[in-house]
Amino acid sequence: MGTQLMASKKLRQNVSHVPGGLCLVVCLSVAGSLLALANNAGGTRGLSEETFTRRLTPEQYKTIIADVFGRDIKIGGRFDPGARVDGLLEVGAGQVSVSPAGMEQYDSMARSIADQVADERHRDILIHCKPKSVREPGNACAQQFLGEVGQLLYRRPLTAAELKLQVAAANEATNIEQDFYTGLALSLAGMLSQPQFLFRQETLEPDPTRSGEFRLDAYSRASRLSFFLWNSGPDRKLLTAAANGGLDTQNGLSRQVERMAASPRLEASVRAFFSDMFQFNKFESLIKDTEIYPKYSSRVAQDAREQTLKTVVDVLLTRRGDYRDIFTTKKTFLTKALASVYQVPFSMPVPNGSPDAWRPYNFAPQDPRAGILTQVAFVSLHSHPGRSSPTLRGKALREVMLCQKVPSPPGDVDFTLLQNTSNQEYKTVRARLTAHSTQPVCAGCHKITDPIGLALENFNGAGGWQTLENGAKIDVSGALDGVELDGGTGLGQAVHDNSAATSCLVNRLAAYALGRTPKKREASWVGSLGQVFADNGYILPVLMQKIANSPELYRAATSELEDVTMMVAPEQPRKEGEK
Amino acid sequence: MNPFNRRTVLRGMLGGTAVTVGLPLLDCFLNTNGDALAATGAPLPPIFGTWFQHLGLNPGMWVPETVGPNYKNNIQLEVLNPFIDRLNIYSGLKYFIEGKPLETHTTGSQIATTGEIPFGTKGGPSIDSSIASVIGRRTRFRSLEVTFGGTRKTYSQQSGTSRNPSEPSPMALYKRVFGPDFKDPNAEEFTPDPHTMARQSVLSAVTDHIKGVINRVGANDRARLDEYFTSIRQIEQQLVLELERPAPLEACSIPGQPAEAPPGTILEDAATNCKLFAGLLSYAAACGQTQVFNVYVDSMQMREAGSSYIWHAATHEESIDEELGYQKGVFAFNTWGNMIFAEFLQTLDGVREGSGTVLDRTLILWLTDHSDARVHGLEKVPVMTVGSGGGRIKTGIHVSAPGDPVTRVGLTVQQALGVPINHWGVDSNGTSNTITDVMV
């Protein structure tokens, strides 16, 4: 099973949570001490829309449960959909709450997980103590277990009040049920439904390196680092480092960053980031007309998504290549179903043990496929159910890959001419778009999307190959920001050479790490990240380490505390030896 | 809620083991007509529903020729004739975008459901949520959301940061409402489950604690945590209800578990799911499980079996038939939407409660995103209501309000159902003018 819980020894809990003697809100400020400070300052100002906690993504929830309790704990149920803000669900996660239906699901999942943890099959492995009697409350064992597991779930040691409460809840439930493990499971389930687990709390402390300013406290820094590099909560080593002051120095932080960046778990974060940035959640509702695209299936869609992620991981992690190469690489990975869409041969080796359904594949130098923009995932995700869409593809390329905003169409516009595909006067979408763009109100936006998307017209709405439309030969000439280009490979090269592609990646990655879009005041930091990225050949792990090592990642912005005049100290963390 | 501490009482009675007790609570029975609660004489509570269907209706095909009562349905709404005495049609209404960018198919939906334009996480509560906060607080579910398109899209939200995802599967809805945690209000015996009591004990302890946390955070995050607590309070409410003997409800019977139906976008599948959902929602209401529901017709991607022509594409691509003067295929789609709406109403009307039916105490608000979807029209938007919510509005009326904001209908409906507001919507989409023609 190999869980953190199994390996966990009780962490030191003599945490000087807030150095300097001044306790600024904190230990439990679920959603943002800065906001609390300002609010308690008499509402002198409404703080920015910045928020300091994020709801766990489904992937993070599942990963934490697997990390803490092992991978054989089954997680059933559905999560509330996320909200995409400034291009990322991870930024939206800082703004969403939980719906009543979503809470029902969390409650149900929590009880199911807790029941499994305490069942006869798992309890001896996961619960490192035994009650004196299984029919009565076992105070000591409940305290040990809930304290131990609590710090992994809350990403910090429980406060005395929290632990006392959870133990009392377990005891009361045990009295009602007359079963220690049932009572313990219910208390654990309660913990899994609480905001301290479901949301990422962040807590502030005075910044010892910048007088009068603030930064995240050690545990919040550990969490921010861990979610950024591993897409999960801190492991035991990181929590120990936080408890021991190991994250208080740049050297200590760097050691942890180095350790974590060298771990295979980095891939989980890279996958999560690109799934988010590329908007792959849209695959959940992607519909294709299977009469027009008979090769399309949910299996193809699933494989297409994975193909692009495998390609990205191969370039960026396996080969530690240049980020820009994801737009030009000839190497990819295919399954049998995808090979059929790409119309290339696919051969499986003789099964040997556990055959992998995936095979590496290199498109020939002259092949019109190269890079992720020509893969099924991108071209099918940004198309209509029954046909391609140069406009949607151009818009997606600008918004997703270059971080540029394309306006929506105005109201009261007649689309009939544009979208009537059977109109023999305009056989190709290029001809229809040209006619449509004669309306000045439409032309402004179409000229920034269509020349990009038209270059991808050899790929139909499901990613298959097409050369004719209504009998007319498809012209795939296009342009990107003044660069003339031809077809998907030409477009990939143009994006590769466009400086917006790398600056977009830097911005998105910084936002992903911070949980919000970088502010203007952070422009110089983001600029320096871009410089480091360029100086190091656009190697992604180098950029990730640079971000993870940046004090800026863990800082509270000065300007937001200017008006704060009063500070509150609600609850002290538990001291060593305190019961 | 209960006038005494149920946890204490039950704990004493149970002593840790399951016993059968008849709790002297909610001893209110239906009167001899079966349409009121005998203990108070009050009528059965109102039910509110929304029916949201994208892509409008064909211009010129749905507005009745005459205004006021005794109107005749235009051709596109003839399928609703069986309900014409309970149907109100509102014509001439408008969505105002006020120079803001139009998010096609979204802006109108936002205005219709929340009275304002903000997108993403910035929006306020949707109309159903405001109404549920008044009439849905004591039911097991504040509201139930369903959709026929296979996705979990929704326009129901506490706010932009807390949306209520739609349920695409009738079987999943059945399990949620009528699964093991359902307490049959007409069961002869009632046995409170000690496990439920233990759950309640843990939950109430931890939520008490977290209330302290809310008081220490800033305003933005407090709003989000308040939403979290609204959600967790529903769980608490469910546990309370599971431990109480429910009031008998004559009309309540447990429907059979539906087979899993494909949640696809083919019209036939959607119609099947619509019927299944209608039955489940009717009995959920009749059994006192909810008083608010939202139906989201994800019409954009729908198509006929064997055809590749989706509804949304048809609105933009189909030429106007020169002889008929309208888009023939779009007319068929829209009429199909009205037909399944009629079937939905029929199902609600088929569940009898004494001398009336579930539909009699229901008020359904029909909304859409555009008037003429072909050009993303925002003027002359169709709006309908069906039912009086138990006599809370007048029905059988065609109201013409040219150039007025769509939100007038929403304001009227909210006031009729007891939401204490006298203005709804923002800027030009805001209004203080109820539709007096239909006010009781």
Image (cartoon, helix red, strand yellow):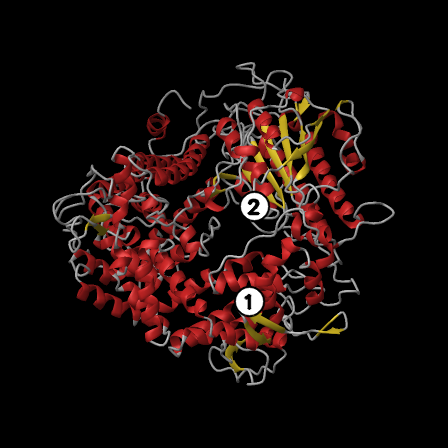
Vertical arrangement, residue A195 with respect to residue B289, above or below: below
Query: Tag 1: Cα neighbours inside 10 Å, few (<14), some, or many (≥20)?
Result: many
Q: Secondary structure at mark 2?
A: loop
Q: Which chain does tag 2 point to?
A: B
- The CA span between labels 2 and 1 is 28 Å
Give the quarter of the image for residue B96. Answer: top right
Disc 2: which residue: B167
Residue placed at 38% from the left, 57% from the top? A60
Residue placed at 61% from the left, 62% from the top? A391
Q: Which chain does tag 1 point to?
A: A
Q: Secondary structure at mark 1?
A: helix
Disc 1: which residue: A378
Residue extending furthest toward the right: B323
Pick the front one: B134 or B247? B134
The x, y position of residue A207, in whole percent, is 18, 52
Vertical arrangement, residue B127 with respect to residue A225, above or below: above
The amino acid marked with disc number 2 is: Glu
Give the numbered dot on residue A536. none
Pick the front one: A112 or A174? A112
Q: Is B155 on the left-hand or right-hand side of A8?
A: right
Q: Is A92 on the left-hand or right-hand side of B144?
A: left
Give the quarter of the image for residue A123. Answer: bottom left
The amino acid marked with disc number 1 is: Phe
Pick the front one: A198 or A579? A198
The x, y position of residue A236, in whole percent, is 24, 60
Circles 2 and 1: CB atoms closer than 8 Å: no
Instruction: State whether residue A378 appears in this view.
Output: yes
Instruction: State whether residue A132 appears in this view.
Output: no
Residue placed at 24% from the left, 46% from the top? A142
Vertical arrangement, residue A63 with respect to residue B219, above or below: below
The x, y position of residue A313, in whole percent, is 43, 72
